[in-house]
Image: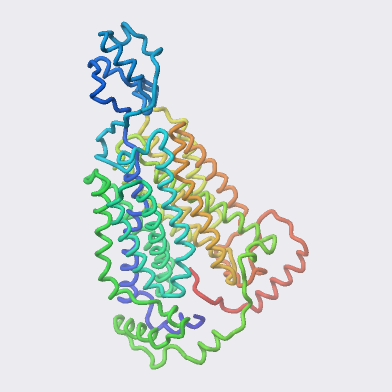
Amino acid sequence: MYDYDQGTAFLGEWGPFQRLVFFLLSASIIPNGFNGLSAVFLIDTPEHRCRVPASANLSREWLNASIPLEERGGRQVQQRCRRFSLEAMANFSARNLVPWRDVNLSQVEQEKCLDGWEYSREPYLSTIVSEWDLVCENDWKAPLTTSLFFVGVLIGSFVSGQLSDRFGRKNVLFVTMGVQTGFSFLQIFSTTWEMFSILFLIVGIGQISNYVAAFVLGTEILGKSVRIIYCTLGVCIFYAFGYMLLPLCAYFIRDWRMLLVALTVPGVLYVPLWWFIPESPRWLLSQGRIKEAEDIIRKAAEKNHVAAPDVIFDLIELQDVNSQDQRSYSILDLVRTQNIRCITIMSVILWMVISIGYFGLSLDTPNLHGDIYLNCFLSAVIEVPAYTISWLLLHYLPRRYSMAGVLFLGGCVLLFIQLVPPYLTVFSVTLVMIGKFGITAAFAMVYVYTTELYPTVVRNMGVGASSMASRFGSILSPYFVYLGAYDRFLPYILMGSLTVLAGILTLFLPESYGMPLPDTIEQMLRVKGIKYRNTSKSKRTLKDEEENSVIIKGTTF
């Protein structure tokens, strides 16, 4: 509401009440970290080869030679999807012929894995890939499973805002936490790939809805000085802590069903938080429930050991503010003028590319050299300094150059990976982590930057459209990883190139650091390098509006 910050200023900015809300809401994000990227271990593909049944009665020599060889990673290894004709091998074995001495195997007919596959028990005892044979002709199902999770995230992005606006932030927060926990538990009992994937999609809906509800609830309760710390350090770093727990759990639990049990149980521990996390007073005021909002503020004042005034929210003033006639804006206003159209297009591209890079690198950790669990842990740890640096950059440096700088850093090192000799494995992993650092920092900064570019009248729609584009990017990201099966460096080349191009695109965006937030579309900062019609008229209009500007309505974070 218009007078909310002024009306609750007596609470202070960082009392016991605000600290409790800050840490409890941040802690509620931890399950999102390990559930959101659990696909790294649940859907990874272990080493496999065609099964040769014992009923084939092959001699030891022919059993060892039953799988053709291929070059992979610079060495000769057994093929994953082909074997020599079982009928031919049985005939050769019965005649006591010796492979390569009596029979040239390069001329022996090959066939598909008609009897299934044998899977390595290292580093996993089982994944859903080995459970339902999602390999060879069915290998497209593995990235599709991850993409379906992100489709759920996309759906959740659409419905979570509307649900929290109608039913309240707190109610939606705990219901969607229950959806995430409950349907993750049901996945344990999946009997088919289709069942697992549908449940995974629903988990995605709950995961993002929980995240958005906690994000909004925190920004509406906390004061201005704490809000940006909560958005960049609180939510993001606790998400990274959850991400760090994922490889630790997976290291000790190698079976995918038992791993899901371990990742699901912590969700139950959040039930008691219902009695400690309050509803958003701002939302209660918007619903006309002024008495409930005042009760929450008075309890907060009691926890902060400050005296609350007799009247916190003036009913008449609130009614006057709510009754003001305001123009209705639609999604079409995001492309109404040349300037806002350019900003919208560039924001959509920027968010999509950053999302592809972030999730692509996160999901690609099993394909890196070295220990998969250590690599995943490093991928999570690198996010902590990335979020910290992004917070410092947002405070002290211009947005445009900060964003472009971290994107150039992330993109250039990813492009450089293809030039690293194969024996420098540690160096190549280090470059991947530096790339993840740059893209993660950009991901944290783009929220604030986009919020500052759009005017108040369409800010929610602008950020929402950009966020939707990032969901499409996350849906595509598993297929960037999938391309690594054809060329190990292709995902890095594509993600690096797109990230560098996004960095160049950022330089054309207007600079918002230290500038007042725009109220109207006419007050928006101008995109660099574009000629506008009626420039003098626009300048006069902008000057007049700035002289007569009012305090921005709504919450800014």
Q: How is the image coloured?
A: rainbow
Image: 278 above or below 371: below
Q: Residue 284's quadrant in the figure?
A: bottom left
- Residue 391 lies, in percent from the top left, at 43, 59
- Residue 223 lies, in percent from the top left, at 42, 74
| 514 or 339, nearer to the observer | 339
* Residue at the far top in the pictured view: 102
Q: Residue 364's quadrant in the figure?
A: top left
468 left or right of 49? Answer: right
Q: Can residue 388 be seen in this view?
A: no
Q: Residue 176's quadrant in the figure?
A: bottom left
| 548 or 358, nearer to the observer | 358
367 left or right of 271? Answer: right
The structure residue drawn at horizontal position 44% and vertical position 78%, both measured from the top left corner, is 283
Q: Is residue 256 visible?
A: yes
- Residue 63 lies, in percent from the top left, at 26, 19
Image: 355 above or below 535: above
Image: 216 above or below 150: below
